[in-house]
Image (cartoon, rainbow, N blue to C red):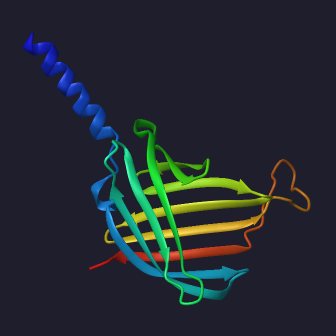
Amino acid sequence: MKYPVLLLLALLSALTSHAQLPKPWLGTWSGTMSIQRQGAVVDSVPVRLTIAPRPEAGVWTWKTEYLSKTRPMTKDYLLRVKDAAKGLYITDEGEGVELTDYLFGNKFYSVFEVEGVLLTATYELRGDELIFEVTSGPTITRGAAGPVTNYPVNNLQRVVYRRAK
């Protein structure tokens, strides 16, 4: 009887370990977001990112605080594991808005469209730095070069986060 119990415990342990976000991602990070339009910096804002485990298995707090003096904002999202073996996660923004994230090694990728704007977002962990980038541009293109459709990148938001002390 004890062998099936041990086998079950080993299986549950393996499943739980696959559903974890690597520990180096966890913590509080701070940096300054640079906002660029067509190559020129148009604004910057201090930001803080908190990534923390939640009581539910396979769920983490993913909270970004924009510490602007004139327009402070908090985006309090959840990151949920969908299929850790495949590197699939979901950023749950609430109110039914979910973005699919793909984890390859130490980098999350997400590509999505909102109201005719194509966005790409990445988070890359490099040692004690976490680099966040979002690019955006319209999905409406003016011509295609053969079988390739090109999309403009008009905007870039970039933060090099460092662990808060």
- For the N terminus, the quadrant is top left
Q: Is residue 77 left or right of residue 138?
A: left
- For the C terminus, the quadrant is bottom left
Number of numbered discs overlaid on the protein picture: 0
The residue shown at (31%, 53%) is 22
Seen in the picture, residue 138 relative to 35 is either above or below; the reply is above
Q: Is residue 35 left or right of residue 79?
A: right
Seen in the picture, residue 84 relative to 31 is either above or below; the reply is above
Residue 110 at x, y = what percent? 58, 54
Residue 69 at x, y = what percent? 54, 90
| Residue found farthest to the left | 2
| Residue found farthest to the front | 95
Residue 106 at x, y = what percent? 40, 56
Q: Is residue 88 left or right of residue 119?
A: left
Seen in the picture, residue 165 relative to 70 is either above or below; the reply is above
Seen in the picture, residue 96 relative to 136 is either above or below; the reply is above
| Residue found farthest to the right | 143
Choose top left, top right, bottom left or bottom right for residue 37.
bottom right
Residue 56 at x, y = what percent? 34, 44
The residue shown at (69%, 82%) is 39
Choose top left, top right, bottom left or bottom right for residue 26.
bottom left
